[in-house]
Image (cartoon, rainbow, N blue to C red):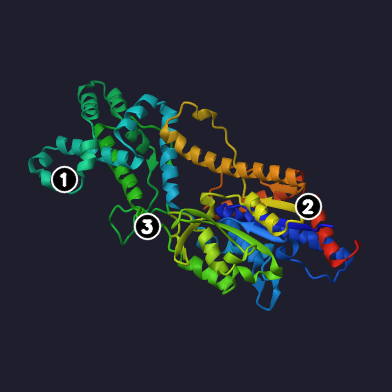
Amino acid sequence: MSDTKFLLSIDGGGIRGLIPAKFVAEIEKRVNDELKKDNPNNTDLKCAEIFDVIAGTSTGSILALAFAKPDPNNNNRPQFDGPFMVDFFKKHKDEVFPSFTPFTIVSEILHMASEVLNKFRLSSMASSVAEEVTSVVDLVRKETLKIETKLTNNDPATNETNDPATNETNVTATTETNVTATSETNVTATTETANNDTAKKVQRKSFIEKIVSFVSPTKEKSDSNDDNTVDASKSLSIDTSNVDVTKSKAENDQSLTEQLQYLDDYVKSFDLLNPRYDPTRFEELLDEHFQENKLKDTANNVGVFITAFNISTCERTFFTNLITKNDDVFMKDVVRASTSAPTYFPAKEISSKYFVDGGVFMNNPTARAYLEARRTYPNSKFVVVSLGTGNYPISLEDHKDSGVIQWVSPLINLLMNNELGNHDDSMKILADLDDAKYYRIQPILKEDINLADTDDESIQKLFTLGDEAIQDPSFKLDELVNLLVDNIRKKNNTPAA
């Protein structure tokens, strides 16, 4: 008679890993509550003593290997459980998930552009701008050049002393050649020939001027620093409720120049040539918690399966002890590799190869982990539990006539969500073919919570979402707990109370 193996898989998802951590804590609690009915003195079991295989990607790898890490005082028992990892994420959220990434600035600028496009219906103007530039940053710098040049030319004192050589140090030849004669002519014609002042102010506003007119700098000036550098950890404040067209031309030009400078400094505050964060503190945490344990050292001999991408050979990599060739690797190194999001942390070197976040190709490792586990245990039946980190479904119908700027942000989310869905569909088919039981627990987010949103409000929302999902009958948590309890009783030859 074949036995039954229980596989737990945990998606990637940054700080939203709190959701599966809470689910594991709840599963442990319910299982132990049931087992104590048999014997009140029963020792509380932990995740690695309840499941036979644990898989994870990115933040899921932190959880998976933490659950598998042996207790130094009792190597056959796991050291960490669900409640510990919930507290770990809360306590170290800003070290493991720094609250601001390079992707945030792109998202905010694109959102700002999208807001303006939706408000003013500037589809034709946006098309014209798209032909002139290849990125929002290029556009900002072009418009800065145009406005500064116009202001300089309109100032007699400046014109008398203006040295072309001085301007060359601030503007590249590439930027100058990208400004078309047509756009210069349109700006000049509009600003010089319109008689009505209000009409002139509205007409002469270009696409980028409308964008930056909604930017409200929130950074307070430092007492020790008088320059215009902007703290990249501050978010842009966008206000689309008021558009002031009553200011004089000089006031508008001055305000526009200041806002352009703010936005330009904001973008320049990023080092585009290096990862955003130093991994030193994160690596210290990994060293502290995982010490010198390797994949082959797992508690209770639990199987582990972790994804990462080898950028040295451009190959998918699976760190697992289900096969011996990949088990002689330190747990802390595997976690560091699987969580090395490109541009976020530098790639992790292991055996002269460099690895990045497994989420770049497989954010939901369930189906692939199942295939590996089935190969290891060919005569076993399986119960597969796949924990997601939350999904925020949005309608894309409003983008049916959108262009590049409006599509970029939702397109990224669309691709990521479809990737998760594809693996979910594959696992459903495999479960049907093999007569396996499959539980996919993926809570629906009421609002989008960024993977790096570590502020207290976002953490509380994740806690609330986790609690609500635990009570959701559609996830069949009670049914799953009964299967787990029955399996443990069977292994221990313990009859039900």
Q: Is residue 10 left or right of 200 when viewed as pictured?
A: right
Q: Who's the residue at 19% across and 35% down the image?
A: 150
Q: Secondary structure at mark 3?
A: loop
Q: Residues within 10 Å of mark 2 (few under 14, many from 20)?
A: some
Check contact, mark 1 vs mark 3: CB within 8 A. Answer: no
Check contact, mark 2 vs mark 1: CB within 8 A. Answer: no
Q: Which residue is mark 2?
A: 480
* Vertical relation: 461 (above or below) 393: below
| Residue 274 numbered tag | 3
Q: If you read the primary sequence from the N terminus, does the residue marked by circle 2 or circle 3 appear first? A: 3
Amino acid of disc 1:
Asn
Q: Which residue is mark 1?
A: 167
Q: Is residue 334 left or right of 159 when viewed as pictured?
A: right
Q: Residues within 10 Å of mark 3 (few under 14, many from 20)?
A: few
Residue 23 visible within the image? no
Q: Which quadrant of the rendered structure holds the C terminus?
A: bottom right
* Vertical relation: 125 (above or below) 69: above
